[in-house]
Amino acid sequence: MADRYLNFTGTAPGRFLTRRLGLPQPAPLHRRTEEHPAFEGQLLHFTAGASPYRKELSELLARTGLQVRGSLSGRAAGPKDLVGVVVDATAVTGPDTLAEVHAALHPVVRSLAASGRVLVLGAPPSADDHHQAAAQQGLEGFVRSLGKEIGRGRTVNLVRIAGPVAAAETTLRFLLSPRSAYVSGQVIEVGAIDSELVLPDDWERPLAGRTALVTGAARGIGEAVAEALVRDGARVVLLDVPSAEGDVAKVAERLGGRALPLDITADDAGERIAEFTSGPDGPELDVLVHNAGITRDRRLANMDAARWSSVLDVNLGSVLRTTDTLLKAGAIRRGGSIVTTASIAGIAGNTGQTNYAASKAGIIGLTRSLAPRARTEHGVTVNAVAPGFIETKMTAAVPLVIREAGRRMNSLGQGGLPVDVAETTAWLACAGSGAVNGQVVRVCGQSLLGA
Ligand code: NAD
C-alpha cells in the first residue's frame, strides 16, 4: 500500500508544511537497483585506540569498491559523495578511548550523504575486564542514540567482532550497501568460524550453487525473499499451503524455481521437504527460510483456544518440528543456513497479539538456543530476522491510525518493504556469513517499540 505521507513530504509544499508543523520528515531510502547495485563514493575509515585490525580492515573496506579515506580534509568531491563512515572501536577499553569515537564522528557526521551509513565495529564486552565491558557496552548506547538523531535515511549499526575480521566481510559489505536500507540501530556479533571461510567468487551472486527452500513464498515477504535469493544466484523451492497452489506456481514459474504445495503444519512436512529437496547424490538443500506465518488477533479475554493454537502451530510448532526432522535427517548440507522469522511483536509485545508475540518470541528462543549446537553438530547456522512494520497485505489490513503510528514510530519514519527483509535474509543465507550465528537482526528502521 502506498505511503502517501512519504510521497507528500517529498514534494516542495509537503516539505514546507511538515517543517512548519514540526511533523516527521521521512527521507526516501536509497535501495539497491539493477543499475546501482552498490553505493558509489567515499568511505571514511577511523580507528579508536590501537586496533590490531587497522591494515586488514582497510584492505577489506577497499574491496567494497568505495574510495576509502582516513580523513575528510583535502577531499576533491563535495560532501554528497561521503556515503559511509566506519569507526573501528574494537580496541576501545575505557572512557579515554571511547572519547576517540566521539572525536572521529563529531566533525564528519553532518557531511554524510542521505541514506549514508555509520558503522561502528566493537568487541564483545569482556567478562573479566569491567573497564573494557563498560566502554564496549557504551558503544551500544552511542550507536542507538546516533541512529535516532541522524535522520535523512541514514543508518547506524554496531558489529561486534568476536573472531577473525575476515569472517565479517559479508556483514560489513551488507551494512555498507543499499541492501540494508531499513536496518538501523542493530548490534550484530560476528564470531569465529570452525571451517575454512568461503567467500563468494562473484559478490553479485553470493548464493550461486546453493539451493534454498522458502516457506510461505506465494506472496508478501516470502515471495520477495525467494526473488532476492534467485537474484543472488540460488535455486529455490517455494512452499505454501495447497490452497495457494496457483499463486505459488506462478511465483515459481516467474523465478525459475520449483513449487511445493504443502501445509507446513502437516505431521510429515519435514519428511516431505527432505524428500523433495534430495537429488540423486543425496541432500541438496543449503538454505531453509522459515517465513510462513499467520495472525489471529484478539485480546486474551476474547481469544479462544483455536486462535491460540493455530498461530502457535504455524509460527512456532511447525518450525520446531520441521527443523528437528531436517537436521536429524542430515537434509541440510554442511555450510548451510537456517533463517527464521521473528517479529518486533515478539520483542516488544503487542495488544491483541499474546498468541502471535508468544510464537515470535519463541522463535527467538529457538534461534539462540539451537544456533551453537546446529553449527557444531550439523555445520549449519541459525539466525532470525525480526521485521518491524513492513508494507504488505497483512499491514494494509491494519486500521488507519494504528497503521500510521506503526509506519512513523521508527528512526527512519516509514514502513519497510518486503525487499528489506529479503535482503537481510539473503545476507544471512550465504556461505560467507558462516560466522554470523544465533543473531536476531531486526529489520525495523530502528523501531521505537522494544528498542
Ligand atoms: P502474508 O500473510 O502476506 O504471507 C504469509 C504466507 O505464509 C502466505 O502465502 C500464506 O499462505 C503462507 N502460510 C500461512 N500458513 C501456512 C502454512 N500452514 N503452511 C505453509 N504456508 C503457510 O505475511 P507476510 O506479511 O509476508 O509475513 C511473512 C512473515 O513475516 C510471517 O512470519 C510474519 O509473521 C512475519 N512478519 C511480518 C511483518 C509485516 O509487517 N508484514 C512484521 C513482522 C513479522
Image (cartoon, grey):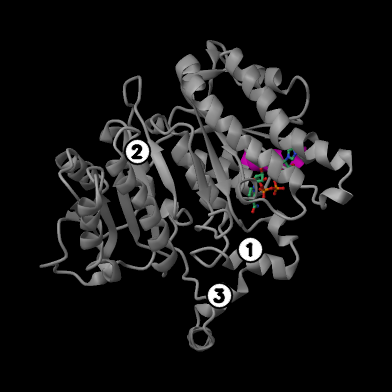
Q: Is mark 2 within 8 Å of ligand 1?
A: no
Label 2 is placed on what type of residue? Pro
Which residue in the protein does label 2 denote?
124
Magenta region, residue range: 245-253
* Mark 2 vs mark 1: in front: 2
Residue 411 drawn at (x, y percent): 49, 64
Q: Tell me the SS state at disc 1.
A: helix
- Quarter of the image for residue 369 reads top right
Q: Is residue 397 above or below residue 11?
A: above
Seen at 37% across and 41% down, the residue is 171
Confirm or deny contact between disc 2 and disc 1 (CB under 8 A): no
Question: Is 226 inside the magenta-drawn segment?
Answer: no
Q: Is mark 1 within 8 Å of ligand 1?
A: yes
Which residue in the protein does label 3 denote?
7
Which residue in the protein does label 1 denote?
406
Seen at 69% across and 33% down, the residue is 316
